[in-house]
Amino acid sequence: MTDQSNSLHVRDVANLLHPNTNARRHEAQGPMIIARGEGIYVYDDQGKAYIEGLAGLWSVALGFGEKRLMEAAARQMAALPYYHTFSHKSNAPAIELAERLVEMTPEGLTKVFFTNSGSEANDTVVKMIWYYNNALGRRDKKKIISRHRAYHGITVVSGSLTGLPTNQRDFDLPLPGFLHVTCPHHYRNALPGETEEAFATRLADELEATILREGPETVAAFIGEPVMGAGGVMVPPDTYWTKIQAVCRRHDVLLVADEVINGFGRLGTPFGCDRYAIAPDFMVLSKQLTSSYMPLSAIMLSDKIYQVIADNSDRIGAFGHGFTATGHPVATAVALENLKIIEERGLIAHAAAISPVLQDGLRARFADHPLVGEVRGVGLIAGVELVADKAQRTKFDPPGQVAAYLHARAQERGLILRAIEDTLAFCPPLIITADQIGLILDRFGAALDETW
Ligand code: PLP
């Protein structure tokens, strides 16, 4: 028998506290060690192959092992591995990437601020919003409205924007001044017989009532993911965003589009804002920006915001915010190459063209299954929600156990998904082919039958 006493498994349990993981269960079962990746597949330390059905954490657009990204990183490491962008310093990849992002994002977003993660980016957006309103002398206009089941990150402020109990309960979040309204999930939150259109109107009315109740002079911004991801993949009614945007404009409430998952083709359009005709004041980008080969996030700002920030920084001496790695040359060089490859290979159009294979395939094969309450999704992101009673839409009590069982059965069959309470989420790399989506459907179907 081989000696396991110094294995990576033992050393992991001895030394690591894992994010978003049940720590005691981890001590008992140990880690799954991923050793390498190629295309849509990752391989564990025993050599077993898995389809990465969630593109890592909704992010590895180009799949694993893309040599051009490694070469771009190596080239930049050799030329200039690091420099900061404080105090007027800059570097070519950061400048070129900013230019590219201004060019490709919706009109009106004219400046970029770089950060390192989605959470940092959302924290920074809140600070910018507060700074903006302070500069305008509106010191009470600071509250931020988000949605239940939103995911915007886990730092103290971005975790307050998030609307998920496990990320907030026991962390004393949300902070005061962060409010949450109803999540635009028709299947769960519509009234009996309510159309999608009426549901969207009711949610916009709810937002307006919340702003009026709090006082518009105290409400600074509304934040949302065009299509919600980590809360369980919730697709809003088609007219939801138009109605929400109108309410925000009426009360001088800024609109923040968190495109950390949606951005760069996930929905089959360049951005979620393109799909839903949203004209945001801020757009937040990360994940597929570098296909997660390097940590990087970016905030796009409208000119209206930039001009106020610039004037105020002049008045007080500096815009006093930034990170050691803001505009990191290696991360931005990798992002540039990543965006070049997405463009050259037409991956956004590919995502749109191939999305029916995933969306219609999931619906055709599983919507009628007795364990399945709803199949939802758009582009190359989807969710399958399990229910205890299909007719009554009854949730499992406690939630998550059946989904966790199904998730484990899929993993045994070489398919990694993500279980979010009772929903299984699908979000494969954008490079996936129709045949490979077929494999996902087959493996998921077998796991579902085993769970039933
Ligand atoms: N915003 C959205 C929409 C996300 O999905 C995530 C992460 O999943 C974040 C923000 C936070 O990003 P990070 O994990 O890089 O801090």
Image (cartoon, rainbow, N blue to C red):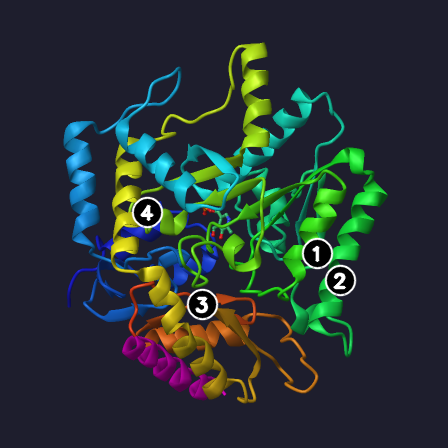
Number of callouts: 4
> Which is in the foreground here, disc 4 or disc 1?
1
Q: Is residue 182 left or right of residue 117?
A: right
| Image location (x, y in percent) of residue 202 | 78, 62
Sequence-first disc among 2 and 4: 2
Q: Are marks 4 and 3 in contact (CB under 8 Å)?
A: no
Sequence-first disc among 3 and 1: 1
Cα distance in 3D space between marks 4 and 1: 32 Å
Sequence-first disc among 4 and 1: 1
Q: Are marks 1 and 2 in contact (CB under 8 Å)?
A: yes
Q: Is residue 449 magenta?
A: yes
Could you tell me the amino acid type at mark 1? Lys
Magenta range is 434-452
| Image location (x, y in percent) of residue 122 | 53, 40
Q: Secondary structure at mark 3?
A: loop
Q: Characterize the magenta stretch by its predominant secondary structure.
A: helix
Task: Count neighbours of disc 2 (C-alpha within 10 A) and say few if under 14, some if 14 to 19, many if 20 or more.
Answer: some
Sequence-first disc among 4 and 3: 4
Q: Secondary structure at mark 1?
A: helix
Sequence-first disc among 3 and 2: 2
Q: Is residue 23 left or right of residue 88?
A: right
Q: Is residue 396 left or right of residue 412?
A: right
